[in-house]
Amino acid sequence: MQGGRIMTAIHDRIKNYRNRLHLSQEYVAKFLGINRASYTQMENGKRKVTAEDVSKLSELFGVTADAILSNNKMSKPATVFARSFEKLDENDQAEIMNLIKFKEQMKMQRS
């Protein structure tokens, strides 16, 4: 145990991140450029996780490579949002900002 938490193996952390984001093994495997069977082996601890895998998984899961490697907490939703938001074009960003403003107004009306 470290810091009051049970240490988990890298393959367990990868599986946990995938499940938290509700991603299929097939989707993650395609993102990594490998077949699903190879990815399943990775999650089961029967295939080594390469540095390139960690880099791609950290991008996909919205966490740092350190989070995957050393059991640090998942990035805050705001960090994941920011990474995704910056990849959108200007029109899509404006649409998201309008949705946020709308949700804020709805919340104020409920208060």
Image (cartoon, rainbow, N blue to C red):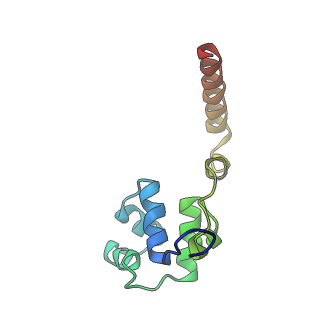
Does residue 53 appear left or right of residue 109 in this picture? left
Indicate the quadrant where residue 52 lies.
bottom right
Q: Quadrant of the C terminus?
A: top right
Front-most of residues 53 and 6? 6
Q: Which residue is drawn at 66% across and 47% down?
A: 78
Task: Give residue 29's position: percent from left, percent from top.
Answer: 40, 69
* Residue 77 vs residue 102, the one in the foreground: 77
List x then y, in percent, for residue 37.
Answer: 31, 76
Query: Measured from the top left, where is residue 31 in percent x and y?
Result: 46, 66
Which quadrant is the N terminus positioned in?
Answer: bottom right
- Image side of residue 94 versus residue 45, left or right: right
Q: Position of residue 89 (x, y in %)?
A: 64, 43
Look at 59% across and 15% down and name the residue there. 110
Looking at this view, name the residue that lies furthest to the left: 37
Answer left or right for 48 relative to 68: left
The residue lying at 37 percent from left, 85 percent from top is: 46
Front-most of 85 and 48? Answer: 48
Asked which quadrant contains residue 64, the reply is bottom right
Give the mark count.
0
